[in-house]
Image: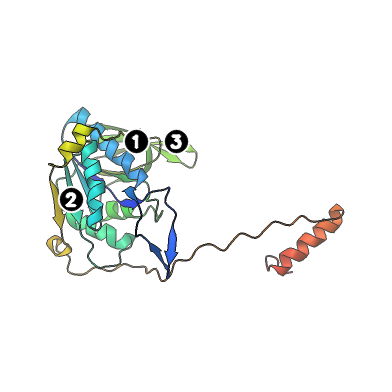
Amino acid sequence: MNIFVLLKQTFDTEEHVRIESGVIADDDVKFVINPYDEYAVEEAVQIKDDLGGKVTIVSIGPDRSEEALRTALAMGADEAVLIDPEDYQLDEHSYSKILHAYLKDQSVDLIIGGFFSVDQGSGQVAIRLAHLLDIPHVSAITELNVEEGKATAKRDAEGDTETVQVALPALFTAQQGLNEPRYPSLPGIMKAKKKPLQRLMLDELGIDEISGKTVSTEITSPPSRKAGEILQGEVEEQVEQLIAKLKEDKVLNT
């Protein structure tokens, strides 16, 4: 079974986000595997251990992304592919286009990714990729059982659980609770150093130019939170004060 995992390197969730000149500063920042992608890596390795096959990790990112890929290899994946985004400003549309350019020529049985990335949180790339590949897509899975030619998944549906069965190949995104990602062992870390890690440029995928459909013009921090105010007087007086405040802040127009 050929299993591909979509992986993104993101800020450590404990890092303090600094915004400088309208962009997020990433100097001296610790980067990790996107937490939801860790569930995807673990699930892929477990399926490989049960059914056999190969797990390939695919990521789009700069050179520093190699660290995240090596961690995934140490967890039990077999190979990794790092696609250089060059100087293009990518969005969910362009990420999915690049992944499609690579995966359309591969023998794919199963693709697993994280439900969303903690830095952007759009949850768009996987579903766009599934559409381009013309394969089924099941999001936010909390359980996955793979059999010959089909897979059954349980997915989180806003507090409820849905059970979905699809034919393979298919794409799934992992929700928290799918499994408990393992820590790379020392032997795993040593083996990961020798596992194949392929680097690709966009032109090697037949992509001469790619641009996003959206552009981020500026990022700003949320406004400072104002101190609360306790309204005085009887209930009727408090109501009048509240209405006056809401009108003053233009929450109420009349």
Please give the name of the residue rendered at 23% of the width and 47% of the height, measured from the top-left corner: 69
Query: Label 2, label 3: how many angstroms apart (C-alpha)?
Result: 34 Å
Give whichever of 69, 161 is nearer the camera.
69
Mark closest to the chain's N terminus, 1 or 3: 1
For disc 1, the neighbor class at 10 Å (few under 14, some 14 to 19, many from 20) is many
Quarter holding residue 215: bottom left
- Residue 11 seen by the camera: yes
Q: Which residue is mark 2?
A: 81
Query: Label 1, label 3: how many angstroms apart (C-alpha)?
Result: 10 Å
Quarter holding residue 168: top left
Q: Quadrant of the N terminus?
A: top left
Is the C-beta separation of discs 2 and 3 under 8 Å? no
Select label 2 or label 1 by which is in front: 2
Query: Label 2, label 1: how many angstroms apart (C-alpha)?
Result: 27 Å
Identify the amino acid type marked 3. Thr
Mark closest to the chain's N terminus, 2 or 3: 2
Q: Which residue is mark 3?
A: 161
- Residue 54 seen by the camera: no
Q: Which mark is residue 153?
A: 1
